[in-house]
Amino acid sequence: METTTAVSLEVDLAPRRPGALRLKNPVLTASGTFGYGTEYARLVDVERLGAVVSKAVTLRPRDGNPQPRIAETPAGMLNAIGLQNVGVHAVIRDKAPIWAKWSVPVVVNVAGFSVEEYVEVARLLDGVPGVAGLELNISCPNVRSEGETFGLRCESAAAVTAAVRAATDLPLIVKLSPNVTDVAEIARAVAGAGADALSLINTIPGMVIDLKARRPYLANKTGGLSGPAIRPIAVRMVYEVAQAVDVPIVGIGGIATAEDALQFLMAGATAVEVGTATFVNPHAALEIVDGLRAWLRREGIRDVREIVGAAQPGR
Ligand SMILES: Cc1cc2nc3c(=O)[nH]c(=O)nc-3n(C[C@H](O)[C@H](O)[C@H](O)COP(=O)(O)O)c2cc1C
């Protein structure tokens, strides 16, 4: 398989912390679509991934929203899982010891309903063997601030980033919400508050109506849209954010093939996360790793970093 031309797929998602989050390839799993990685380990060679990103972890365990909480949509799906998870203490006790035996880095997706909760979860995860970094999911409502979502305003997005930054030395990726008018403005605020990298996009709110019941189909009424339907929106946002910040970007949204991943890299992403596609094909992320390598070899490119931002003006 690995014949003549050696192609480097290695990327660094936290260049300010040398060696802390250097990945052997730029393909990660997206939070909430790969469990804690452990569920897939029998099915997929997780060690071949660039990194695993866990399901969102909160301070206390959460049951999530009532059913139904998933709906199929054209070229995608709606989900309203509601941050169901076992809580940070169980993650540290039961999951991290397994991750510590893997060579693939595991990034823990952190969610919270107050700045204090994010900080507490980050502090508890700091220094835990098996935890390679944090991804802050700032698409959560702040219970202390009239339910306003952290990721929708520069001030609250920067405040939670700065507070977590002060609580841990772990590489910190902040995951941006697409539900804003100017994503570049939020990206600048979060990068300025100390994020090592940014990931985008999270899901876009949507609704499906059950005609028989004449009601929204999801018990939660609305859900987050993901899958190929959102890909052009995500590519556009990565392109805009790449012009606004100089920290690495992780592109997310409807990536199912190496060609999809390449669009994000050319728009300016250093790496990508694969989400909904894994539900259709559990091997999607690994096929993207192989597809990227094959594409680069065909193009005579020896280092994946050469194509990052290739679609930007002046390149
Ligand atoms: C079932 C499901 C659960 C998700 N759970 C989380 C989560 O816990 N934390 C988070 O930051 N994003 C979560 N997401 C969002 C994904 O990580 C990703 O940002 C989004 O689905 C877009 O990528 P995709 O189109 O490749 O799925 C979830 C998505 C799905 C479909």
Image: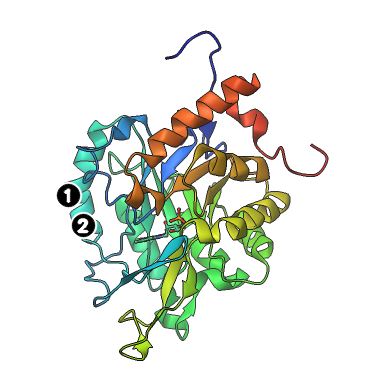
Is 91 placed above or below 298 here? below
Q: Which residue was labeled with disc 2?
A: 89
Could you say where residue 64 lies in the image, as x and y percent from the top left? Answer: 26, 72
Could you tell me which secondary element the residue under label 2 belongs to? helix
Could you say where residue 265 lies in the image, as x and y percent from the top left? Answer: 61, 40
For the point 56% across and 72% down, the residue is: 152
Q: Is residue 52 left or right of residue 263?
A: left
Can the viewer see residue 10 in this picture?
A: no
Question: Which quarter is ligand 1 in?
Answer: bottom left
**Quick check: marks 1 and 2 in contact, CB under 8 Å?**
yes
Dot 2 crowding, Cα within 10 Å, few <14, some 14–19, many 20+ = some
Could you say where residue 219 lies in the image, as x and y percent from the top left? Answer: 30, 81
Three-letter amino acid code at the position of disc 1? Arg
Q: Is residue 304 left or right of residue 172?
A: right
**Quarter-wise, where is residue 57 in the image?**
bottom left
Q: Which residue was labeled with disc 1?
A: 93
Dot 1 crowding, Cα within 10 Å, few <14, some 14–19, many 20+ = few
Is 249 placed above or below 175 here? above
Three-letter amino acid code at the position of disc 2? His
Q: Looking at the rendering, in which quadrant would you find the N terminus?
A: top left
Is 118 placed above or below 308 here? below
